[in-house]
Amino acid sequence: MVQLNRAHNELFRRSPDERFASLQELSDFCHNEQRVSADCWQIPRAMKPRSSAGLVTVMADEQELQLNDWSFTQLCRLSGISKDTINRLSPDTASLAMQETLPSSDRPIQLLTTGQSVRSLHGVSYTRLWNSDLLDVVSEFASDFQPPQAGCNDATGLYAGEQDLFAFLIDPTGWTEIEDQAFAPGFFVWNSEVGRRSLGIQTFWFQAVCQNHIVWDAVEVVDFTRKHTANVHDGLNEIRRHIETLVQKRDERRDGFARVMSRAMQETLGSDGDSVIRELTKNGIPRGLAAKAMEIARQQGRFTIYSLVDAMTRLTQQVKYIGDRTESDHKVAALLSLVA
């Protein structure tokens, strides 16, 4: 079992305006971002960095476009000048430096714009996958999943900002047993429309999530990532397949547990007290615990496996020492294997 820290890292780096209370709210935001964004293709030498109001801006198609932190970083990279170096220059000098160092090739640059602002700059090899398209898949195939409890700083596990998206979702009703321990399914999913990170998903089964959004004791951890190249949209099919596999396994385990419980409520261990005690002691249950459980089960009219397990579970909670209690609980739970 492993400890997963992706959501923990996101929790402490996200500002309040990047947090969303529900998957629907996050999806609405991302759909609106797509609606108001547009691509603009430019030859590098036709782009004109300039100084305006103390900032470096870009002229494209006779429009002056503002740069956010991420697109400014990409422009520095495109110019081949360190961002740290540019930041030490005055806006006038910085814009002149970029004019001198932008590529002179005829390969176009893709500008993603929202109104008068540039969100990102990319070469021709980059293929965009919208956050809204990813969330449509998540909403359709993970409809039972929801964010975990709010973190210690009220962070939600659902985030989107100017650079990327991240969502942490669990199924709080999906608890089931794996090797005699309780686990629930969950997953992380992420993407960036502006090239900040890859498309990806990580599915898992976990035992606990703390207020720091650390996922504890995770098993069956599966990762998938895809770069934003020509086949990135095929990654949505993989995302869907990973979610469907997680949901299918959840349903199989939940249905299997329900079948065991149903049989346990019907099958008995014996027709009288002596035969029941013999069966219980044969399966490692102390005679004293078995006798007390029988008295409780007798009130229900039948010595079903379920009634005996339920009675003994309540009795073991009275054991003083946790080590002894855990050992007793394990023996009691093992009785369900008689009908598995």
Image (cartoon, helix red, strand yellow):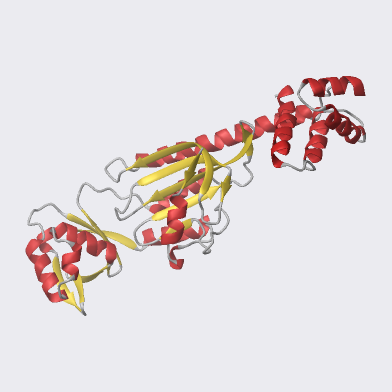
The answer to which image quadrant residue 82 occupies is bottom left
User: Most extreme residue toward the bottom, as rendered?
Assistant: 53
| Residue 240 position within the rendered picture, expressed as x and y whole percent measured from the top left | 46, 40
Number of marks in picture: 0
The C terminus - image quarter: top right
Q: Residue at x 92, y 35 (%)?
A: 299
Return the residue nearer the eye: 219 or 293. Answer: 293
Above or below, 236 against 191 in this view is above
Q: Is residue 85 left or right of residue 132?
A: left
Q: Residue at x 44, y 47 (%)?
A: 189
Q: Residue at x 30, y 50 (%)?
A: 128
Whether residue 44 is visible, yes or no, is yes
Whether residue 339 is visible, yes or no, is no
| Residue 289 position within the rendered picture, expressed as x and y whole percent measured from the top left | 83, 32
The answer to which image quadrant residue 303 occupies is top right
| Residue 193 position within the rendered picture, expressed as x and y whole percent measured from the top left | 33, 54
